[in-house]
Image (cartoon, rainbow, N blue to C red):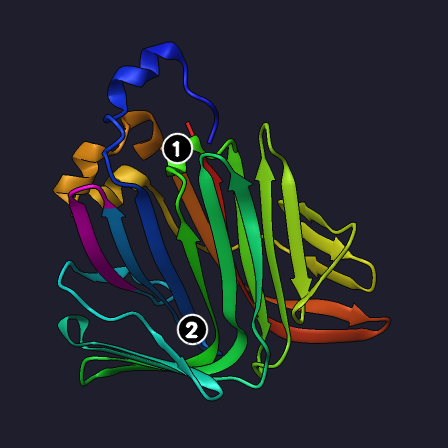
């Protein structure tokens, strides 16, 4: 999200008297046959503005995306024992994740303007997602949550690369975040351990003793933030047009990771590129 020019300032709403706080969950599941479910829970408090949003999107190879959203109040996912559960009656959604892996966390940004805290609650798990009486998907999955007190358009990055790879048995994981812009940063975690000197490229995630190739063969979605905000008019009016024009492309692919010499672990990667304008 690059710094804005003077001409952009008229598009940015005045800072409200009260602070900005965004909490967001991302949860997913990819079945062996390639079907995928991506779910979001988000809560925004910004002055007098209060928004609660949930979304579930189903991606089936060869078919259009099917998406459901709700703005009704709904509790976030619950972490307990060795798993995560989440129910959204409005979406007829029930998400269940069982995991033997430990979560991890990082503070991605800490400035006078605010902070970004990121926690991977379930880096690799076995997931069952039920959507209504006729749709059930089982596979490997991932879940994270993020809390922000900085206005998103004040984060000094131009491009974001994010992704997760989970082995088919739901035991191994690779998670990465890469920022490009005036504050370039890279985080790569292999089975919960941060990898020093790791690289994130469009077609490869690499670190000592670990390598993951990406082909971008299957595009799940390509959209702008404004497309999402069109269903939340009050938030669309409060978001600068230049920031709402950001473009996100997301892919899903079956790919094996090299975790040791001669050892290849089959799994699925979900990853995305976000271009901020």
Residue at the (25%, 40%) spot, across then down: 18
Q: Position of residue 178 (x, y in %)?
A: 60, 45
Cα gap from disc 1 to disc 2, whole angstroms = 29 Å
Q: Is residue 142 magenta?
A: no
Q: Is residue 234 left or right of residue 223?
A: left
Q: Position of residue 191 (x, y in %)?
A: 67, 72
For label 2, the crowd category at 10 Å Cα-Cα, with few meaning under 14, some 14 to 19 and many 20 or more, is many
Q: Is residue 148 visible?
A: yes
Residue at the (29%, 58%) spot, across then down: 42
Residue 220: which quarter of the image? Answer: bottom left
Which type of secondary structure does the marked residue at label 1 adopt? Answer: helix
Disc 1 vs disc 2: Cβ atoms closer than 8 Å? no
Q: Which mark is residue 109?
A: none
Q: Give the labeled residue for mark 2.
A: 29
Question: Which residue is outermost to the front?
Answer: 17
Looking at the rendering, the stretch of residues picked out in magenta corresponds to 46-56
Residue 268, placed above or below residue 271: below
Front: mark 1 or 2: 1
Q: Nearer the viewer, residue 17 or 6?
A: 17
Q: Nearer the viewer, residue 18 or 201?
A: 18
For the C terminus, give its image quadrant. Answer: top left
Residue at the (31%, 43%) spot, across then down: 20
Question: Which residue is outermost to the bottom?
Answer: 81
Q: Nearer the viewer, residue 218 or 92?
A: 92
Q: Give the labeled residue for mark 1.
A: 153
| Mark nearer the N terminus (1 vs 2) | 2
For label 1, the crowd category at 10 Å Cα-Cα, with few meaning under 14, some 14 to 19 and many 20 or more, is some
Q: Magenta segment, principal secondary structure? A: strand
């Amino acid at each position: 999200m690059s710094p804005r020019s003077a001409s952009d300032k008229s598009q940015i709403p005045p800072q409200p008297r009260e602070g900005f706080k965004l909490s967001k969950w991302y949860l997913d599941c990819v079945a062996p046959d390639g079907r995928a479910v991506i779910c979001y829970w988000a809560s925004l408090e910004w002055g007098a503005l209060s928004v609660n949003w949930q979304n579930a999107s189903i991606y089936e190879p060869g078919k259009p995306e099917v998406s459901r959203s709700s703005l009704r109040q709904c509790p976030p996912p619950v972490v307990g024992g060795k798993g995560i559960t989440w129910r959204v009656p409005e979406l007829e959604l029930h998400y269940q994740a069982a995991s033997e892996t430990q979560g991890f966390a990082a503070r991605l940004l800490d400035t006078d303007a605010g902070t970004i805290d990121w926690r991977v609650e379930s880096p690799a798990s076995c997931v069952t997602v039920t959507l209504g009486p006729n749709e059930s998907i089982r596979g490997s999955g991932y879940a994270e949550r993020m809390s922000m007190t900085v206005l998103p358009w004040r984060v000094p990055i131009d491009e974001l690369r994010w992704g997760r790879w989970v082995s088919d048995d739901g035991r191994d994981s690779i998670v990465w975040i890469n920022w490009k812009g005036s504050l370039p940063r890279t985080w790569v975690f292999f089975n919960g351990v941060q990898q020093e000197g790791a690289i994130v490229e469009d077609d490869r995630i690499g670190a000592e003793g670990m390598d993951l190739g990406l082909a971008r063969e299957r595009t799940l979605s390509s959209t702008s933030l404004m497309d999402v905000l069109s269903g939340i008019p009050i938030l669309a009016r409060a978001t600068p047009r230049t920031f709402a024009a950001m473009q996100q492309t997301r892919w899903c692919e079956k790919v094996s990771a090299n975790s040791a010499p001669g050892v290849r672990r089959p799994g699925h990667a979900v990853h995305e590129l976000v271009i901020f304008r």
